[in-house]
Image (tube, rainbow, N blue to C red):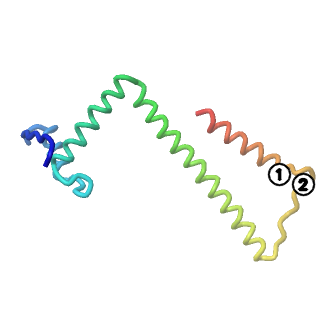
Amino acid sequence: MSGRIVSTNIRFNLEKEADRTAWDYLQQRDKGQHRSYSRAVIAAVNDYFERRGRLASDPYLETREKEDAFLLRVLETIRAGFNHAALVSAADTFLQFLQGVQPQAAPAGGVIQEDQQEADDTALDFVDSF
């Protein structure tokens, strides 16, 4: 082994909540991801101090992360709603076809298409406001 290895001890006072929680995390670690206590502690220490450094240089980082996560959930919900609406519409059309019922003709001038386009534009404007 070439390189320098430093060894140290860590003590956990299991009567203290923070120590007990840390010990429990180490006991329940994903051994595929962190083969040893050393690997888990190294990852935790690095993550902690890197995040503190990023927060010190950008105090709004945490707020933006929360806003981005919220926006992502809103967008996923809207997409799921559009997908659900498209599936329901397609299923209704298919059932009408199977029953031999002809769909009603759209009014002259494409009023339904214009209303749908206006609704789509309004939804996209709402999403863009974030």
Give the vertical position of 28 relative to 95 (above or below).
Answer: above
Secondary element at image label 2: loop
- Comparing 36 with 115, the one in front is 36
Instruction: Write the residue at 62% across / 39% down.
Output: 127
Mark on residue 91? none
- Comparing 9 with 122, the one in front is 9
Position of residue 112 in the picture relative to residue 39 (left or right): right
- What residue is shown with label 1? 112
Residue lying farthest to the front in this orientation: 2
Q: Amino acid at mark 2?
A: Pro
The image shows residue 113 at horizontal and vertical percentages of: 82, 51
Instruction: Write the residue at 87% across / 57% down.
Output: 106
N-terminal-most mark, 1 or 2: 2
Instruction: Write the residue at 83% across / 66% down.
Output: 103
> Dot 2, crowdedness within 10 Å: few (<14), some or many (≥20)?
few
- What residue is shown with label 2? 107
Which of the 4 quarters of the picture holds residue 120?
top right
Q: How many labels sit on residues? A: 2
- Comparing 4 with 55, the one in front is 4
The image shows residue 110 at horizontal and vertical percentages of: 87, 51
Secondary element at image label 1: helix
> Dot 1, crowdedness within 10 Å: few (<14), some or many (≥20)?
few
**Looking at the rendering, in which quadrant would you find the C terminus?**
top right
Give the vertical position of 30 relative to 93 (above or below).
Answer: above
Give the vertical position of 67 relative to 118 (above or below).
Answer: above
Q: Amino acid at mark 1?
A: Ile
Position of residue 33 in the picture relative to residue 89 (left or right): left
Which of the 4 quarters of the picture holds residue 10?
top left
Marks 1/2 in contact by CB < 8 Å: the verdict is yes
Give the CA distance from mark 1 to mark 2. 7 Å
The image shows residue 22 at horizontal and vertical percentages of: 17, 43
Position of residue 108 in the picture relative to residue 29 (left or right): right
